[in-house]
């Protein structure tokens, strides 16, 4: 016969339950056993070490020549401003063409365009007045803008 023929999990559980009931120091024994187990686990688990982060490799992207003079910078700024002014003028022209188109469309569909323009102008004036009233207390405290 083998050793394993005499081993039974149910018999083991019954034996443990009997010993647990008969031992007057069972809770103290359990506490010591848990403390020793926790101590061993704490000693065996290594301390976590974190490596310092790798240094960044920064790549600068330059769009201008690095040795530009002040005069070159100013000339570049003037050219850019002229280009922006030209684009703004083109956009303004497109906006005016759109307005004319919608006015013609409105007149073709029998809409009172002049009354709509008048109403829009009144609404803009009311909005400017409301904005001015809203900003007045701030200007009293801070003074006029730009001073």
Image: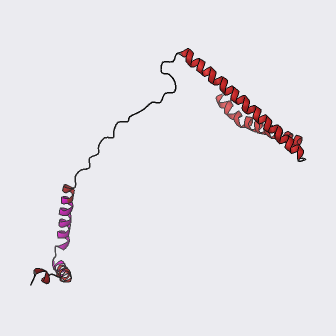
Residue 33 in the image: above or below residue 19? above
Quarter the N terminus occupies: bottom left
Total residue callouts: 0
Residue extending farthest to the left is: 1
Residue 81 in the image: above or below residue 113? above
Q: Is residue 147 visible?
A: no
> Which of the pair 86/138 is nearer the observer?
86
Residue 109 in the image: above or below residue 86? below
> Which of the pair 107/55 is nearer the observer?
107
Q: Position of residue 60 (x, y in %)?
A: 45, 30
Q: What segment is highlighted magenta in the picture? A: 17-40
Q: Position of residue 11 (x, y in %)?
A: 18, 83
Left or right: residue 54 compared with residue 146: left
**Residue at (26% x, 49% y) in the render:** 48
Q: Position of residue 93 (x, y in %)?
A: 76, 32
Quarter the C terminus occupies: top right
| Quarter location, residue 129 | top right
| Quarter location, residue 76 | top right
> Which of the pair 104/112 is nearer the observer?
104
Left or right: residue 135 compared with residue 96: left
**Residue at (38% x, 34% y) in the render:** 57
Left or right: residue 139 compared with residue 129: left
| Quarter location, residue 32 | bottom left
**Residue at (54% x, 16% y) in the render:** 70
């Amino acid at each position: 016969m083998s050793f394993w023929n005499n081993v039974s999990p149910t018999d083991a559980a019954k034996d443990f339950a009997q010993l647990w009931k008969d031992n007057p120091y069972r809770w103290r024994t359990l506490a010591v056993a848990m403390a020793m187990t926790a101590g061993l686990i704490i000693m065996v688990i290594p301390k976590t070490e974190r490596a310092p982060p790798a240094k960044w490799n920064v790549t600068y992207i330059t769009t201008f020549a690095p040795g530009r003079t002040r005069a070159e910078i100013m000339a570049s700024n003037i050219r850019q401003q002229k280009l922006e002014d030209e684009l703004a003028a083109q956009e303004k022209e497109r906006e005016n063409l759109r307005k004319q188109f919608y006015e013609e469309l409105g007149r073709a569909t029998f809409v009172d365009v002049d009354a709509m323009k008048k109403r829009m102008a009144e609404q803009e004036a009311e909005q400017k007045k409301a904005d001015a009233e809203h900003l007045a207390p701030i200007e009293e405290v801070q003074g006029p803008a730009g001073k």
